[in-house]
Amino acid sequence: MTLYMLQFAYTAEAWTAFTKNPEDRTAAVKALGEKLGVRIEAFYYGFGEYDGFLVLEAPDETTVTAFTLAALSPGHIKATKTTVLMRPAQAAEAMRKATGIKFEGPKR
């Protein structure tokens, strides 16, 4: 299974609703993931360009995209960004594969 970071930004209307009715969305997000075969590894808020992020484990890009589309459907999220993540052992394996490989850059 592949890891993904899904960053999200709420709409102003969503923040208005949250300030009137504070809510921990963890259970709802995990339940959505379970319906689609996505495991939520982490869920944090950050308040910046994006309001928070999830670390998801999913079998493929189609599944993580379906999760994202389902999460967007109520209209409370205005932006998302998905990034494929690698565990340190996977990054080390990529480094080993690249060792000794020659590639010529553009001619100057």
Image: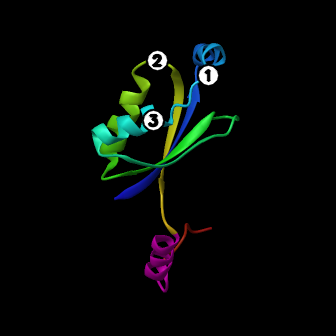
Q: Residues within 10 Å of mark 2 (few under 14, many from 20)?
A: few
Residue type at mark 3?
Ala
The residue wearing badge 1 is 22
The quarter of the rendered structure image containing the C terminus is bottom right
**Residue 29 counted in the magenta span:** no
The residue wearing badge 2 is 75
Secondary structure at numbered mark 3: helix
* On screen, residue 67 above or below 15: below
Q: CA distance from mark 2 to mark 1?
A: 18 Å
Residue positioned most to the right: 48
**Residue 94 counted in the magenta span:** yes
Residue type at mark 1?
Pro
Query: Disc 2 or disc 1, which is closer to the eye?
Result: 1
The residue wearing badge 3 is 27
Residue type at mark 2?
Gly
Question: Where is residue 59 shown, x and y percent of the image?
Answer: 30, 53
* Nearer the observer, 82 or 10: 10
* On screen, residue 94 above or below 17: below
Identify the mark nearer the N-term, 1 or 3: 1
Question: Where is residue 81 shown, x and y percent of the image?
Answer: 52, 39
* Residue at 41% in and 39% down: 30
Q: Which residues are magenta?
A: 88-101
* On screen, residue 43 above or below 73: below
* On screen, residue 51 above or below 37: above
Question: Where is residue 105 shown, x and y percent of the image?
Answer: 54, 70
